[in-house]
Amino acid sequence: MKEQTMIYCVMFEDAAGKEDLRQQHMAAHLEFLGACGLQVLGAGPLLETGTGSGGMWMVEAESQEEVQEMVQEDPFWPTGLRKSVPILEWRQVFREGARV
């Protein structure tokens, strides 16, 4: 029997001084996200005063371990770009002005 999927919020904090790695590996990173299909509900950079300081993914998966595996398959992972990567389960309770 297949487990129920959950939504996870993955917060990426980039390491200082590694900004060049982001640009060097961006094309491969975006290709990777595209290959994940509908499992990645949304993804994008987090900005601090207009400069990228990390990113966030919303991922639908069966477990936190599955999300961790996905993170480690991302071309950004082996570069040392990521300083920290908390993976948090997210439960939506409010949408479009109403409780769900």
Image (cartoon, grey):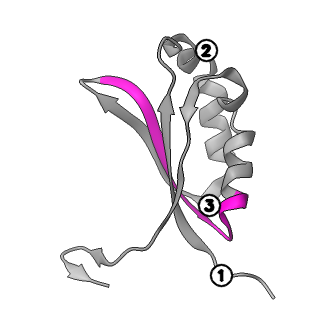
Say which of 44 and 38 sits in front.
Answer: 44
* Type of amino acid at the residue the image marks with label 3: Gln
Q: Secondary structure at mark 2?
A: helix
First-in-chain label (1 vs 3): 1
Q: Where 12 sits versus 4, above or below?
A: above
Does residue 27 show up magenta in the picture? no
Range covered by the magenta-colored residues: 51-66
Query: Which residue carries the number 2 mark?
Result: 24
Query: Which residue carries the number 3 mark?
Result: 39
Lateral position of residue 70 relative to residue 9, left or right: right
Q: CA distance from mark 3 to mark 2?
A: 25 Å
Q: CA distance from mark 1 to mark 2?
A: 37 Å
Q: Where 74 sits versus 70, above or below?
A: above
* Type of amino acid at the residue the image marks with label 2: Gln
Q: Hey, which quadrant is residue 91 in on the image? A: bottom left
The mark found on residue 4 in the picture is 1
First-in-chain label (3 vs 2): 2
Graded by Cα atoms within 10 Å as few (under 14), some (14 to 19) or many (20 or more), the crowding at tag 1 reads: few
* Type of amino acid at the residue the image marks with label 1: Gln
Total count of labels: 3
Q: Nearer the viewer, mark 1 or mark 2?
A: 1
Name the residue at 75% across, 41% down: 73
Q: Nearer the viewer, mark 1 or mark 3?
A: 1
Q: Secondary structure at mark 1?
A: loop
Q: Where is residue 26 drawn, in percent x and y? A: 58, 25
The mark found on residue 27 in the picture is none
In what quadrant of the picture does the N terminus appear? bottom right
